[in-house]
Image: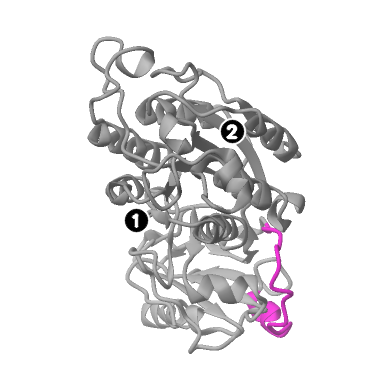
Amino acid sequence: MTGQRMTSRTTWLWSCGGLTLAAAMFVTCGPAPIPGSTSDIGGAAGSGRGGSGGPITLATSTSKSTGTDSSVGTSTQVCKQSNNNLTKQNADVLLVLDKTGSMTSAMDSGSQCSDGDADAGTCQQRWSTMVSGVNAVLGGAATTAGSVNWGLELFNSDGNCGVAATPDVAIAAGSAATVQSTIAGVTPGGATPTRQAIINATAYLQTLTDNNGKYILLATDGEPNCLNTGKGGKGGGGQGTTDLTGTAGVINTAYTSDGIKTYVIGVGPDVANLNQLAFAGGTNTYYPALSPQDLDAALSAIVGAVASCTFSLGGTPPDPTNVLIEFNGDSSLRPPQDTSHTNGWDYTTPADTSIQLYGSWCDNVTNGTYSSYEIRMGCPGIPVQ
């Protein structure tokens, strides 16, 4: 009798990863479902895979049961079984924008470049090019569809090493026009207190109570300064002292402690050190921009990724190392987990509660090549198939 029970349970656990599932369904190993219940994945299998591929809503039907083997007198808790859909996660993006004096230089050199020259096409000024690129992405489909809510923090705030305690524009639906009008009135000048800007940005994002993903988009043309000695990064002093290490530290804290990723766009030719900041923020490499075209491509790639290729799991998988993603019901279309964020998928937060797709996998989601999505979550020690 005991042998029969254990055989039945083991067969279910090993076969659950290989069932034919409806599009965008989560499955974790568990006991055989009750026919007719919301967790009856046998019934769901007959519905096919013809999902729409677009944003779909997370269901909340779950079951968890405990079986008792009377022959040995022990109680064994089995894994949770879910029958849920995949949720595209909207994004709150705080643009942390460098408005320091060097932003009046040319995109491809250190030469000064007036706004008038940029408009005439004889010189591409960093600031005016940045304004143009930001305006384009703020008017894009992700913003108008409500997938991305924008906010703005400018640094510095006083022509020196100060940073305002609150954003210049708070994150909200429909805030894009306010961001545009705010940066239109800015005259660049002063130092680069990047570390204090990140500290303030993180503190602000922590106050938001919605369920959207939280991101910092840092756009800068150079190395952080305003090392926090004396008045340092809080106003006055320290302008000539590099603060790259301190800035990377607060970016890494935002990511590891709060799940806030930082994307970095480096404007101009002297920003190779910004890879350190991107790596600390969980995005691995910065986006270089030596031309208006580079800048537009970088902004579009970042916004496309957070708006179209980030998905909530609704919780932490039973075994975060035992997750399988499949597209279009095709076992050959299974992206690998890729911690280099080049071409695959990876968790977006240390808590493993959401994932992001990268490279061709993200491209094929956004362009509609993949019309259905399935994620399978296995129990510890029981591989998904």
**Of 275 and 257, the residue lying toward us:** 275
Q: Residue at x 40, y 75 (%)?
A: 336
**Of 56 and 378, the residue lying toward us:** 56
Question: Could you tell me which quadrant the C terminus lies in?
Answer: bottom left
Q: Is residue 46 magenta?
A: yes
In this rendering, the answer to whether 215 lies above or below 71 is above
The quadrant where residue 340 appears: bottom left
**Residue under circle 2?**
152
Label 1: how many residues lie within 10 Å, few (<14), some (14-19) or many (20+)? some
Numbered tag placed on residue 284 in the rendering = 1
**Of 329 and 19, the residue lying toward us:** 329
Q: Residue at x 27, y 19 (%)?
A: 238
Question: Could you tell me which quadrant the N terminus lies in?
Answer: bottom left
The image's colour scheme reads one colour
* Comparing labels 1 and 2, the label whose residue is closer to the camera: 2
Amino acid type at circle 2 is Leu
In this rendering, the answer to whether 2 lies above or below 121 is below
Q: Position of residue 45 (x, y in %)?
A: 66, 82
Numbered tag placed on residue 11 in the rendering = none
Amino acid type at circle 1 is Asn
Q: Is residue 302 magenta?
A: no
> Is residue 93 at all visible to an observer of this figure?
no
Part of the protein shown in magenta = 41-59
**In-image side of 250 versus 57 (left or right):** left
> Is residue 139 at all visible to an observer of this figure?
yes
**Of 208 and 59, the residue lying toward us:** 208
Task: Mark 1 or mark 2: name the one nearer the start of the chain.
Answer: 2
**In-image side of 221 versus 151 (left or right):** left
